[in-house]
Amino acid sequence: MPGAEVDSTRAWRSVAATFVSSAVTLGIAYSFSAFFQAMATEFGTTSGRTAVLFAVTTCTFFFLGLLTGRAVDRFGPRPLLLVAAVSLLGGLVATSAVGSLTVGYVTYGAGVGIAAACGYVPMVAVVGGWFVRRRAAAVGLAVAGIGVGTLVASPLSARLIEAYGWRDTYRILGVGGAVLLLGCTLLIERPQAGSGSNRPRFTDAIASPVFRRLHLSACAFTIALFVPFVFVTQDAKAQGVPAVQAALLVGLLGGASVIARVVFGSLTTRVGSFRLYRMCLAGHGFTFVLWLVAGSSFGLRILFVVLLGIGYGGFVALSPVVLADRLGVEGLGSILGLFYTASGVGGLLGPPIAGIVIDATGTYRWAIVACVVFGIASRGLLVGLPTTPAGRLEPEPSRTA
């Protein structure tokens, strides 16, 4: 809204709305592991085919971020949240009635995918445009909604499935989620002119070698990251862990990410955004070693998801700040939309390929080994990027000329 001041009470209302919209859309999307076994059993599908449902959804919402990030720069956040509410309700209700998993690829993938594309990527850009002094902390708090949503939605879904079945659970989540998203439209507003530029920044980002390296690193990071979102629960069940307790693993992953998003966001002024970002990626691959050696230990799996959640939370909270440091906040929605296609690639490739490997070998071991390799590669790709003494990425030369 013209004349609205950055870092104001109005700005913090947008943080609250983004927190809730992220919690609803991505919390539901990332709770898929709770539905995995029930749907695979009913439709008689393999791990690889069932994982495609999650892959289609993540690919849809991250690639659609190209459009919704641009749309929020032009039209503001409220129309997008309305689309998110309608899409989430329609997609989940339609999925609850499907007779085959193939139809579910369309109903769930499109419904939840569009809802997440409208309720997450552009809303983060809105928050970034509302703040100057407290941008890192505000973004960290806003995206903490993803962790809270995952922490709540995964075990809640498992309990609802036990009580009502997976079809009715999707109906319940669809109605409840749509109501919450409609409520968010009352809180959020378009930020000041500047971050809401009508000029798309796709060309600027693609022309930047640093952006391209960050994008490739994020691809490697998320190829590994999304595998446990689908399979850590199934692995625990295979070791005899009860369904609700096993679903708690994904919830703990999300819960641990909440702490990281808030803490890392508040540390950027002292440590530096890019220095913290590299730290998050540095331990990513090695964290998977805990899963690799867990055996029958539920405790090691808990340690694995907690440490993974910390690194994941830092990655999510710091990515918008790192990109803004390098490319500025003008047209940030389009820049974030392009960057998050990396996560779309990760979601599209990671879980289905892992499922195929698991089906072929009868073990989770080799899929986890691949995650170790991709995790290490994600950090290696950041070596040599230009950094200021304060631990931030240097601005693009064209911005400092």
Image (cartoon, rainbow, N blue to C red):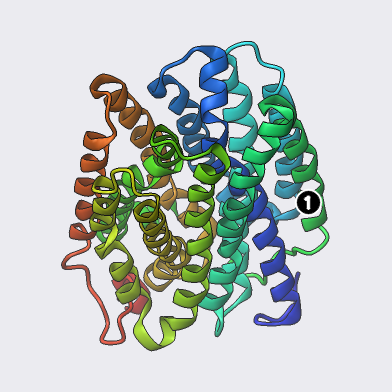
Labels in figure, total = 1
Left/right of residue 254 with respect to residue 396 in the rendered view? right
The percent position of residue 179, horizontal first and vertical second, equals 82, 47
Q: Would you say residue 194 is visible in this rendering?
A: no
Residue 332 image position (x, y, % from top left): 51, 61
Residue 200 appears left or right of 293: right
* Residue 257 vertical placement versus 168 (above, below): below
Which amino acid lies under the numbered mark 1 shown in the image of this protein?
Leu
Q: For the point 58% across and 47% down, which residue is it?
A: 26
Of residues 354 and 137, the one drawn nearer to the viewer in this rendering: 354
As drawn, 8 above or below 256? below
Specify the quadrant that holds the N terminus: bottom right
Query: Where is the C terminus found, in terms of image quarters?
Result: bottom left
x and y percentages locating residue 251 in the rendered image: 54, 52
Residue topped by disc 1: 180
Query: Does the rendering let one see residue 219?
Result: yes
What residue do we see at 57% from left, 29% from top?
Answer: 109
Q: Secondary structure at mark 1?
A: helix
* Image height of 35 relative to 102, above or below: below
Nearer to the camera, 350 or 73: 350
Q: Residues within 10 Å of mark 1 (few under 14, many from 20)?
A: some
Q: Where's residue 88, x and y in %? A: 70, 37
